[in-house]
Image (cartoon, rainbow, N blue to C red):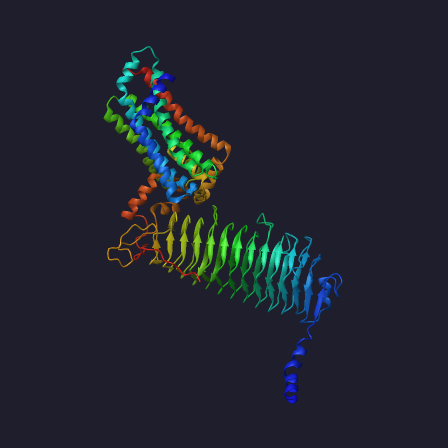
Amino acid sequence: MNWIFVYICIFFIVPHTGMLQAETIRVCKKCEASTIKEGILKAAPYDTVLVQKGTYKEVDIRIDKPLVLKGENYPLIDGEFKGEIITIVSDDVTIDGLFIINVGTSYTKDYAAVRVTRSENFLLQNLVLEKLFFGIYLEKSNNGRIYHNNILGDAEEEYNSGNGIQLWYSNNIEIEHNTISRVRDGIYLEFANNCTIRNNKSVNNIRYGLHFMFSNNDVYSNNTFENNGAGVAVMFSKEITMHNNVFQDNWGTASYGMLLKEINDSEIIGNTFKDNTVGINIEGSNRVTYKGNDFIGNGWAIKSRGACYTNLFLENNFLFNSFDLSYNSRLNDNKFENNYWSNYAGYDLDKDGIGDIPYRPVKLFSYVVNNTPEAIILLRSLFVDIIDFSEKVSPVFTPDNLVDQFPKMKPFAHDRN
Amino acid sequence: MLKILKYSFYDLMRSRWSYVYFVFYLLLGFVLLFLNNNVSKAVITLMNVIIILTPLIGTIFGVMYYYNSKEFTGLLLAQPIKRSTIFLGQYFGVALSLSMSLVVGLGIPFIAYGIFMSDAIWDFGLLLVTGAFLTFIFTALSFNIALRNENRIKGFGYAILLWLFMAVIYDGIFLMSLMIFEDYPLDTFSLSATMFNPIDLSRVLILLKLDISALMGYTGAIFQKFFGTNFGMFLSIGVLALWVLIPVWFIRRVARRKDF
């Protein structure tokens, strides 16, 4: 028996104690370190710096070795608007449970509450950021995770505000369960590939809820984008997967649920677009599959601005939009099939659930408005209803082949999980 | 004039058609609110109805009333009463009773569903005001037509044509000219073209007050900038008032010179 016990000690406990050499340094008024900077200075690599509840008026906290900076009961770090608060320049850093406020505003430098520079394997979680310029700023940092943070800005104007979470040349980042509101762009990705953006909530932002530039192979799913100045913009990227997101209440003369520009080979599946001025604004996007989305009560469900080829629109619900589709050329290479259109007035004699006559989603008036935007002033005029009706009966102006040959008679009940 | 106005007004209030008109609006209001229970959405649907229907009813009713009471008018003319008094009295009698049917008929259901509690009160008020204006405008125009045409069939024909022109054909010409001259800046043109047609003017006034104005993009923004200000609002109300005053002035002139 004794021998066995000794073996257990040697093989299990001894290596563990070796790892436990990572020490915990406490930070509080009366602890071994009274400021966070001091705590970090005293810490050896892979130590934990435990910040206890209290207020710490510090800026330019530089984390230059791998460690865990953890807050107990959300200690407050007040930057007093002096500049950047935490800068991470080392790999393997975790920041957890801090309340950071008052980041300085500058017109020459992008001060952030937490910045990660040229580092890998970081984890930023349970942070609360308020009164900020930029929230979390990643530059040339890969393989990190941004989890369960709450970012609440007080942005009023675009020119003097920053973004909630910004990625610049950063790959393989997971952004999950964050809540971002009232900043310029909720989440901004520039040259960020293979990122996953999931279960976030980006609401009431000045410009975009999510902004994509030159970022390929990214996935975003189950996010909610609500009441943002201009909705969500996805630009100059390819192979993006967008699943089960909700885009709603992006209402205004220059607002979109989603703006797609130069997006190729992507999937837009199972999303909900509700009460937006324009559900999706598409420009120069090819080979994109739109499947199982709900477009409910938008001004325009889809506005196609041209140079869009070989896109597929399958099994979507178009419910009570002022215009289902706006299309600006006579040439059509996109396929609409098996969608449900609430404006469809056809019949189904053979009872197979598919309308017997094809549906033409482009109204004549929407075609006219595309060519002469001023004509929108005749919206809801009796004349417009009459010409729409006559165009529906015998199409002359709208593209001949832009039809849904198999419109569904009943809306789809989409499974959203 | 007041006496004749009172007489015409009571005469119409007793007539079946005012009741039908009143009950129609009452039912419309209740059905709309019953179906979607949302006061601001009901206002949008109601706008479509009011913009088309009030001018039509105003026109037809005006012409009809004039021709029907022709003999009584002849009798009145034999009395020592000023001509303008007779015709203006009749005109205001018709226009007032029609507007009252509209305002009361729609007012009751909306008050019952709590318009005073809702934010849509101003939109609804604007809707009623423009509806009343449209009634006054088109009744005056129809009186002019009726005064100039002894032949009833001709008079009715012109009246219907007038309505058709204002409600449909005008917009067609408007749209065509927008499309033909699309290379030119059209903001001022579309603004003034809207001003010249009371139906379009009312439609735009109401649309701009509703959420749906966001659909209008930058064109809407130009209109909003114009109509959204106090100046624009006064100007458009002024234009609507002019649309009433000028035909009324014509009624007086024609009535004074006409040989009965």
> What x and y, as percent, mark residue A191?
54, 62
In which image quadrant can residue A34 be found? bottom right
Relative side of A191 to B148, left or right? right
- For the C terminus of chain B, the image quarter is top left
Relative side of B259 to B36, left or right? left
* A416 relative to B161, above or below: below
- For the N terminus of chain B, the image quarter is top left
| Residue lying furthest front | A1
Give the residue displayed 71% in from the left and 68% down from the top. A25
User: How many discs mark residues in the rendered view?
Assistant: 0
* A174 relative to B170, above or below: below
> What x and y, as percent, mark residue B105?
37, 33
Give the residue displayed 37% in from the left and 16% down from the top. B3
Asked if one can make out residue B197 in the rendered structure from this viewpoint, the answer is no
> What x and y, as percent, mark residue B53?
33, 34
Asked if one can make out residue A315 in the rendered structure from this viewpoint, the answer is yes
> What x and y, as percent, mark residue A281?
44, 53
